Amino acid sequence: MKRVSKVFYIAVSLVAITVLLGAFFPARFEQITNNVKNLVSTTFGWYYMLLMAALVIFAIFVAVSPFGKIRLGKDNDKPDFSTGSWIAMLFSAGMGIGLVFYGAAEPISHYIANAPESEAGTAQAFKEALSYSFFHWGIHVWAMYGIVALSLAYFQFRKDEPGLISSTLKPLFGDRMNGPLGTAVDVLAVFTTVFGVATSLGFGAVQINGGLSHLFGLEVSFTSQLLIILIVTVLFLISAWSGLGKGIKYLSNTNMVLAIVLFFAVLILGPTLLILNMFTETFGMYLDNIVHMSFRTAPLNGDNRSWLNAWTIFYWAWWISWAPFVGMFIARVSRGRTIRQFLIFVILIPTLIVSAWFATFGTTAGDVQNKGFDLTQYATELVLFNMFDHVTFSFFLSIIAIMLIASFFITSADSATFVLGMQSTRGSLTPANSIKVAWGLAQSAVALILLYVGGLTALQNTIIIAALPFSFVIILMALALYKTLSIEIKQMNKKAQIKKRK
């Protein structure tokens, strides 16, 4: 415990205070978070849209510029993990639970319940439902993750700085990041991470509960979700104890196998030809309309603005709240890769995967809906399982889905305990197991309290609030990264010129 920093004690105290307020004043807590969430969504919606669009532009610029040849590490460093394991690890940590939770439910909601732009229930709304799902889970998300992870990896492995968010800001603030200012930044990153990950754990517990209820009649209740979280907590703590090279790596590979099996099963057993045609057309729509979607704020249309607040703004805030966790984890497993390779893989590969996923599950859900079975009557966590009822081998598909959610659940929590351990032990690449266990228990406690005080509503409220202050840190990280890369590339060019003269 000697290496534990002030960040650990301050962040744990803040998390504990928040949890206690939620536990003892649940109604008031939900009311306050809802009011603040509405204020943030209404007042800062334009800001979230501009920020995410700007990060896409910046990521593309860095990837295609001379900066792209710089290696994340020393010039002779080789990657720590194979490309396959690397993709599996970054993808599992990035959004695994959410894909299963929203894979069928989001497109069917956009199509039937509340369309983003067109009239609900129309063929155009069906296509928009998929293209907007790609938008919410695609290029913008991974560009933002990519910039945060790139900044962390560059300063940690190239400049030998500690693996902390505060270290990435030293080019702008100098040694002040070694004092109270740096501590404040790292505490904010830890606090944001805890609530961002807790949200996904809550989603996972709710959907596992829903799946077990659908298959075996298990009561959908807080008590059931409590038992699920307790069981999974024990499992991910065992995995966390085994370390990065074993637990997380093996679980990530397992996730990918289960996800591939479920994906191809639905693709083959569902309306295959329709899925392939819808993917082709709607992915083209996504690319064709990406600029319009990136800057759309619907200032003169109240209904469309409400939709943006509930979906796009919520997603941008959710992903930002995950940025310190996912960014630090991706950075940790990406040493030895060039900046160009890093950004291309981190942005394009997951975008293609999630688009194919939503096209497959969303089209299947839409097809079930068009045949006369209303999926919108079910809660979000139950849409997937009721869709499976209309596909061959539905029971086995549901079992695989529950296993996949549980596996993603364990991996996300396991990865987060590692990252939180790093952030609270001065950037150590091998945080003590006792620290990881403490953060693992804290994450589960936060997820339980948020479920107790208001279910998914309280979860969504909290992350939108937590993400706002960290979004400003991301802007500073991008500026610091650009400043340092510019200096390094000038030095590299100068050395090349001197060598050429010789």
Image (cartoon, grey):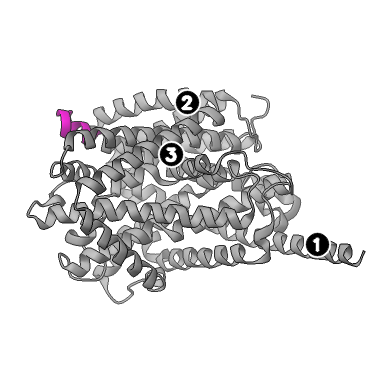
CA–CA distance in space, label 1 to label 3: 48 Å
| Residue at horizontal 60 percent and vertical 36 percent from the top | 422
Q: Residues within 10 Å of mark 1 (few under 14, many from 20)?
A: few
Give how far apart the Cα atoms at labels 1 and 2 are.
43 Å
* Viewer-side residue, 8 vs 253: 253
| Dot placed on the residue nearer the N-terminal end, 1 or 3 | 3
Residue at which label 2 appears: 239
Which is in the foreground here, disc 1 or disc 3?
1
Toward the bottom, the furthest residue is: 300
Q: 391 or 471, which lies in front?
A: 391
Give whichever of discs 1 and 2 has the lower sequence position. 2
Residue span colored magenta: 209-220
Residue 246 percent coordinates (x, y): 53, 28
Give the label on residue 18, or none: 3
Disc number placed over residue 491 in the picture, else none? 1
Q: What is the magenta segment's predominant secondary structure?
A: helix
